[in-house]
Image: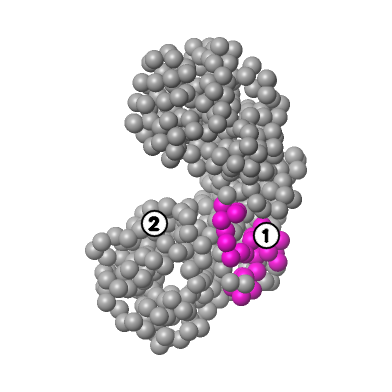
């Protein structure tokens, strides 16, 4: 079989849907060539181009010395995306050849080609996913480095060159859409860029141009990207009829929240192409929705599921006991603590059940259980506290999930005696090891609730919580997790 490239696409030997093939002006400079951006923003821009709503191409920059630039260029920027999952309970598979990427540049080998991108008057957007550690300050980066080490330093140098080439033209600034998984990612990027501008003693007019002619949007991204399907690639490529070394897979669901002025939305109108994108002046409610319902749904259920003998999320979702447990926890206890429109919250929650049950994704419970204490603090505990604040009573399912967490951190299933591996910070593991050595459930619960370094407060002060957790934990130890859940 031949390898996917633009010549192969022009021959029309594949029946797979493809994006538009005509040459487009490059409007996007993208830092990061990995699976996530190619299955998320690049896919979205391809959809925009197909709908004749953007008509812009992407030049990708390889952000570190080792990467996929050569592979991307060998295929002329083309790759196939396979989206698989459940929609309203039914299996859906969609395939498309993405054509939005023009080329990929490795600045460590071709610095001049990379730096010349700022000469392009059509260039408007800068998108990035340089991992959570990418938007950080690194001491020692200089304006004259080719290239700088840190991503924000690279951006500062590019901005200065853009400013210089176009003599401070206010229409030649950029719109930044960082996709790194940190809070207020755009604000953080801008903060470090300004720090470098000051450190490099660049003129005040340039700083003003950064402030007033560029937009650093904060974003929230949501799509599970399963990437290159190594175990299935031979069969899939046989079905496609060509070799694709950049083949990418992801779930059907996608969601993109962008904090930005409405005039920016008009420049890249994702929602007009039917994409699940929200433009807002405050992404906080959507962050809370994702953390509390999606992430919280995972954290409130996977430890209990493992103690019931399940190995994967899929196995958990095949059990009606856990469907009921999740429904009661999410719809009756988490959603009432959130302030978005109920229809919006319900729609998102319904999609979570499809995502958890996706037969194409194999999520192992022990992998999700990594660092569960810190996850519980940010994902589930706020729902417990807010529920009590609003209802003046404890949420039964979420309180049970706290007892399940303590039981899980004993390192064994008390019903079967089977031991399991725990992965967390050393101080967390040592704490629970010491507590469970006492064999006193009342003290284990009391001391766990009192651990302010875990929860940020003493949970013994939450009326009735300690007693309720103690009673539930006794039931788990004596009768097993499954019997405890049935009583709910």
Location of residue 192 in the rendering, given as x and y in whole percent from the top left corner: 36, 65
| Residue most extreme to the left | 140
- Residues 404 and 349: in front is 404
The residue where tag 1 is placed is 275
Determine contact: label 1, label 2, CB under 8 Å: no
Give the residue displayed 53% in from the left and 46% down from the top. 228
User: Could you tell me how far apart the alpha carbons at marks 1 and 2 are, in whole angstroms?
Assistant: 27 Å
Name which quarter of the figure residue 152 lies in. bottom left
Say what secondary structure mark 2 lies in: loop
Q: Is residue 80 above or below residue 449?
A: below
Location of residue 87 in the rendering, given as x and y in whole percent from the top left corner: 73, 45
Residue 380 falls left or right of residue 18: left
Sequence-wise first label, 1 or 2 = 2
- Residues 318 and 299: in front is 299
- Magenta span contains residue 71: no
Give the residue displayed 69% in from the left and 33% down from the top. 328
Name which quarter of the figure residue 422 lies in. top left
Asked if residue 123 can be seen in this view, the reply is yes
- Residues 92 and 279: in front is 279
Residue 55 falls left or right of residue 145: right
**Magenta part of the chain:** 263-287
Residue 412 falls left or right of residue 41: left
Location of residue 12 in the rendering, given as x and y in whole percent from the top left corner: 67, 61
The residue where tag 2 is placed is 134
- Magenta span contains residue 284: yes
Say what secondary structure mark 1 lies in: loop
Q: Is residue 331 above or below residue 134?
A: above
Asked if residue 357 can be seen in this view, the reply is no
Give the residue displayed 75% in from the left and 43% down from the top. 88
Q: Quadrant of the C terminus?
A: top right
Q: Is residue 433 above or below residue 149?
A: above
Give the residue displayed 41% in from the left and 32% down from the top. 451
């Amino acid at each position: 079989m031949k390898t996917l490239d633009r010549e192969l696409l022009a021959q029309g030997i594949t029946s797979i849907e493809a994006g538009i093939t005509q040459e487009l002006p490059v409007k996007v400079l993208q830092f990061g060539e990995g699976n996530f951006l190619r299955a998320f923003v690049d896919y979205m821009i391809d959809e925009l181009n197909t709908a004749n709503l953007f008509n812009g191409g992407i030049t990708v920059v390889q952000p570190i010395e080792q990467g996929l630039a050569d592979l991307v260029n060998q295929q002329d920027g083309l790759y196939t995306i396979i989206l698989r999952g459940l929609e309203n309970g039914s299996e859906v598979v969609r395939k498309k050849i993405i054509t939005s990427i023009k080329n990929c540049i490795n600045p460590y080998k071709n610095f001049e080609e990379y730096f010349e991108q700022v000469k392009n008057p059509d260039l408007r957007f800068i998108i990035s996913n340089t991992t959570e550690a990418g938007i950080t300050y690194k001491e020692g980066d200089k304006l004259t480095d080719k290239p700088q080490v840190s991503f924000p330093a690279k951006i500062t140098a590019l901005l200065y060159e853009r400013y210089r080439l176009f003599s401070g033209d206010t229409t030649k600034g950029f719109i930044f859409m960082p996709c790194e998984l940190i809070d207020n990612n755009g604000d953080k990027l801008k903060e470090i860029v300004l720090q470098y501008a000051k450190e490099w003693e660049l003129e005040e007019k340039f700083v003003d141009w950064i402030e007033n002619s560029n937009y650093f949007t904060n974003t929230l991204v949501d799509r599970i990207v399963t990437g290159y399907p190594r175990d299935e690639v031979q069969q899939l490529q046989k079905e496609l009829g060509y070799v694709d070394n950049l083949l990418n897979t992801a779930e059907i669901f996608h969601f993109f929240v962008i904090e930005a002025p409405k005039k920016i939305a008009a420049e890249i109108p994702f929602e007009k192409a039917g994409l699940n994108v929200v433009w807002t002046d405050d992404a906080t409610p959507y962050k809370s929705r994702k953390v509390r319902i999606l992430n919280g749904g995972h954290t409130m259920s996977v430890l209990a599921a493992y103690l019931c003998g399940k190995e994967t999320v899929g196995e958990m979702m095949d059990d009606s006991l856990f469907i009921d447990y999740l429904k009661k926890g999410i719809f009756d206890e988490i959603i009432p603590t959130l302030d978005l429109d109920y229809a919006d919250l319900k729609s998102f929650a319904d999609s979570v059940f499809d995502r958890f049950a996706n037969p194409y994704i194999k999520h192992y419970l022990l992998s999700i259980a990594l660092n569960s204490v810190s996850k519980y603090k940010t994902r589930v505990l706020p729902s417990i506290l807010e529920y009590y604040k609003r209802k003046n009573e404890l949420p039964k399912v979420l309180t049970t999930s706290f007892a399940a967490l303590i039981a899980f951190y004993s390192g064994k299933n008390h019903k079967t005696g089977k031991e399991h591996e725990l992965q967390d910070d050393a101080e967390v593991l040592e704490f629970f090891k010491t507590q469970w050595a006492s064999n006193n459930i009342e003290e284990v619960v009391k001391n766990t609730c009192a651990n302010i370094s875990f929860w940020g407060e003493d949970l013994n002060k939450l009326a009735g919580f300690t007693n309720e957790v103690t009673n539930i934990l006794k039931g788990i130890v004596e009768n097993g997790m499954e019997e405890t859940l049935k009583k709910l």
